[in-house]
């Protein structure tokens, strides 16, 4: 009994060490990735606005119109031909990867996302760097998991570790990074992944401090509430931000639809078209270029007037929607902060004009507006409250911030059920809420249970040749491959046997096979495979290479599904055993 107890304790100890090591590794890599990404943005900004300005100096002030277009000419082909999932903010792609692909993200996402987003932002595209670094950090976590061949549950935890680390290193906000990973990426505050996410976030934040210093993301003056009635004004600001968030999401995806309808323009050229439009806006409102943190600081320090803040709300909304909707690569988190600051400053100015004795500091509303727009657009009030607190380093603003963020989140989620990241997945037909429901088959990947030793039949075989090859085989389904080794169809033993009984054995087997193939990739979950089997009433699915859908690497059958269910249950048991020390002792005693 004592020996068994020591063995279990030792195994648990080594498992914890392993998890901590993985979390630290992902945190370090993500922190360094954030450093490199910010340097890339700086380099691209210098190339486009300084060197590009010199080349286009003959255009005078109008040269800025062409810069975002030039960036789009690079970003469009880069993302279209190398990694189309890097278009847009990237956070939705991470949520989808966790929900339906067991956390699998292609390694190429890291360099393509970094380069494409840096060019987009550096050339003046109206986008943020948070979405890209979240996507890159999550991809780094996924790559670590793929290299070490970790199970699906741990792979998801590593993806969340990378996402948290990206935000922590970017904003020096480790707690906010943890909450973002839990509230937005995983949609779950429970589980054994919490420790790993915290460690990764803190590690990435330390890397960020080493390179960028231990300073808040924004320099914020000290604010003091002058009258208790001002809390009502902050609640009204929260409601206004919630209403604006609904408008933000609707306009954002409406612009994307408009670009999708432009069939005469190739997809890889649409970012250039969008860049030209943004360049036109930036000619009159240069504040919309790039991330816009300098303009945000002006708003929260009271250096902007009412008419400018009001105008920037609309032009930033249009510029961001055009930049991302046209297919460029960049985030929507920082634009949300920007528009929230402008909306808050506008409302603060109005309250100050009407009630100068109560709303004495209009700039304070800009800071609260930043958090409120994030809370409403991402449906993540906890993340917004803590991140804005960490970014401002001023506890006195926490009560107004909490009131406004909760009000904004309630209004936005009531009027529009999905946050700005999830809408992209919903429009693809993915029920994200259903995908997040407990299901042991979501913790098992196709690669873990598929049959890798498959028998293929050449497409040029006759029925007689095919039957001769498979009649003694233990398998039941047989993919057809052509001269290039590409899978073109699938046929079963029963279909071959019936064809042989009907005669005409010289008939090409290719004529009898099913050619409309429903396939899965190795990093899809068994739950997703079951759904495909049910929808198409089939008993087996060819497993194809994610990078080359024509190359078959395995087969997953209903028998494999049964084995997968057993594997999923075992993983659940192992998780419970690892989480509950008290339960471990009771189990040991029972032994």
Image (tube, grey):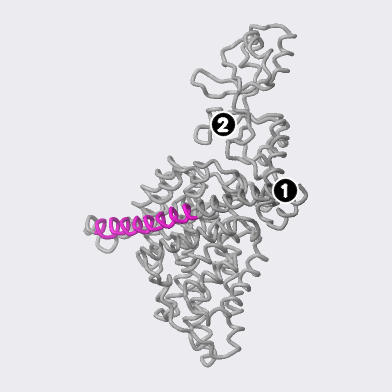
* Marks 1, 2: nearer the viewer: 1
Q: Is residue 457 above or below residue 360?
A: above
Residue at image point 69% right, 56% down: 580
Q: How far from the left and from the top, in percent, is residue 392?
A: 47, 75
In the displayed structure, does residue 392 sit left or right of residue 155? Answer: left
Residue at image point 60% right, 61% down: 183
The Cα atoms of the two marked residues, 1 and 2, are separated by: 47 Å
Q: Is residue 250 above or below residue 224?
A: above
Question: What kind of element bears circle 2?
Answer: strand
Residue at image point 57% right, 50% down: 14
Label 1, residues with CA under 10 Å away: few <14, some 14-19, many ≥20: few
Question: What kind of element bears circle 1?
Answer: loop
Q: How far from the left and from the top, in percent, is residue 432?
A: 65, 51
Q: What's the magenta region? A: 24-53
Q: Is residue 49 magenta?
A: yes
Q: Report the front residue among 169 and 500.
A: 169
Q: Report the front residue among 269 and 364.
A: 364
Q: How far from the left and from the top, in percent, is residue 87?
A: 47, 49
Label 2, residues with CA under 10 Å away: few <14, some 14-19, many ≥20: many
Residue at image point 72% right, 54% down: 585
Which tag, 1 or 2, sits closer to the chain's start? 1
Q: Which residue was labeled with disc 2?
A: 544
In the displayed structure, does residue 419 sit left or right of residue 81? Answer: right
Q: Is residue 503 magenta?
A: no
Q: Are marks 1 and 2 in contact (CB under 8 Å)?
A: no
Residue farthest along the right direction in this orientation = 590
Q: How far from the left and from the top, in percent, is residue 518?
A: 63, 32
The prevailing secondary structure element of the residues shown in magenta is helix
Q: Report the front residue among 411 and 155.
A: 155
Q: Which residue was labeled with disc 1?
A: 1
């Amino acid at each position: 009994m004592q020996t068994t107890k020591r063995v279990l304790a030792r195994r648990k100890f080594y498992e914890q060490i392993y998890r901590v090591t993985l979390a630290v590794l992902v945190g370090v890599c993500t922190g360094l990735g954030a450093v490199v990404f910010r340097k890339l943005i700086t380099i691209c900004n210098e190339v486009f606005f300084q060197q590009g300005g010199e080349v286009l100096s003959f255009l005078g002030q109008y040269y800025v119109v062409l810069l975002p277009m030039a960036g789009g000419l690079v970003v469009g082909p880069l993302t279209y031909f190398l990694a189309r999932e890097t278009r847009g903010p990237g956070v939705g792609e991470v949520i989808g990867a966790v929900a339906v692909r067991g956390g699998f993200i292609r390694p190429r996402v890291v360099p393509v996302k970094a380069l494409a987003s840096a060019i987009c932002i550096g050339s003046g595209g109206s986008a943020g760097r948070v979405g890209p670094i979240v996507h890159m950090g999550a991809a780094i976590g996924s790559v670590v998991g793929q290299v070490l061949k970790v199970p699906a549950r741990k792979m998801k935890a590593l993806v969340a570790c990378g996402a948290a680390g990206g935000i922590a290193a970017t904003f020096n906000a480790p707690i906010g990074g943890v909450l973002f990973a839990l509230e937005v990426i995983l949609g779950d505050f429970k589980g054994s992944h919490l420790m790993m996410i915290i460690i990764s976030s803190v590690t990435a934040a330390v890397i960020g401090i080493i390179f960028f210093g231990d300073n808040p993301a924004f320099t914020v003056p000290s604010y003091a509430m002058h009258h208790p009635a001002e809390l009502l004004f902050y609640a009204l600001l929260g409601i206004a931000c919630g209403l604006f968030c609904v408008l933000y999401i609707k306009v954002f995806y409406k612009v994307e639809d408009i670009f999708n309808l432009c069939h005469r323009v190739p997809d890889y050229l649409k970012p250039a078209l969008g860049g030209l439009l943004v360049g036109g806006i930036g000619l009159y409102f240069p504040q919309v270029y790039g991330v816009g943190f300098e303009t945000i600081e002006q708003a929260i320090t009271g250096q902007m007037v009412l008419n400018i803040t009001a105008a920037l709300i609309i032009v930033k909304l249009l510029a961001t929607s055009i930049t991302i909707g046209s297919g460029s690569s960049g985030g929507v988190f920082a634009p949300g902060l920007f528009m929230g600051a402008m909306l808050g400053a506008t409302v603060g100015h109005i309250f100050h004009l009407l009630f100068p004795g109560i709303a004495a500091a209009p700039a304070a509303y800009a800071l609260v507006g930043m958090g409120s727009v994030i809370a409403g657009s991402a449906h993540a009030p906890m993340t917004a409250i803590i991140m804005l607190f960490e970014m401002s380093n001023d506890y006195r603003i926490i009560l107004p911030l909490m009131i406004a963020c909760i009000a904004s989140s309630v209004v936005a989620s009531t009027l529009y059920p999905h946050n700005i990241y999830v809408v992209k997945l919903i429009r693809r037909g993915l029920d994200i809420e259903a995908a997040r429901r407990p299901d042991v088959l979501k913790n098992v990947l196709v690669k873990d249970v598929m049959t890798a030793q498959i028998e293929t039949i050449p497409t040029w075989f006759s029925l007689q040749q095919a039957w001769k090859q498979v009649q003694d085989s233990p398998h039941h389904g047989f993919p057809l491959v052509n001269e290039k080794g590409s899978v073109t169809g699938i046929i079963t033993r029963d279909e071959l046997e019936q064809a042989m009984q009907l005669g005409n054995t010289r008939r090409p087997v290719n004529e009898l096979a099913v050619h409309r193939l429903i396939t899965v990739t190795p990093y899809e979950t068994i739950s997703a495979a079951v759904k495909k089997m049910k929808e198409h009433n089939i008993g087996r699915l060819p497993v194809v290479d994610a990078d080359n859908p024509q190359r078959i690497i395995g087969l997953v059958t209903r028998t494999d599904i049964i084995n997968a269910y057993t594997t999923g249950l075992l993983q659940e048991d192992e998780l419970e055993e690892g989480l509950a020390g008290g339960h471990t002792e009771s189990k040991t005693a029972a032994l």
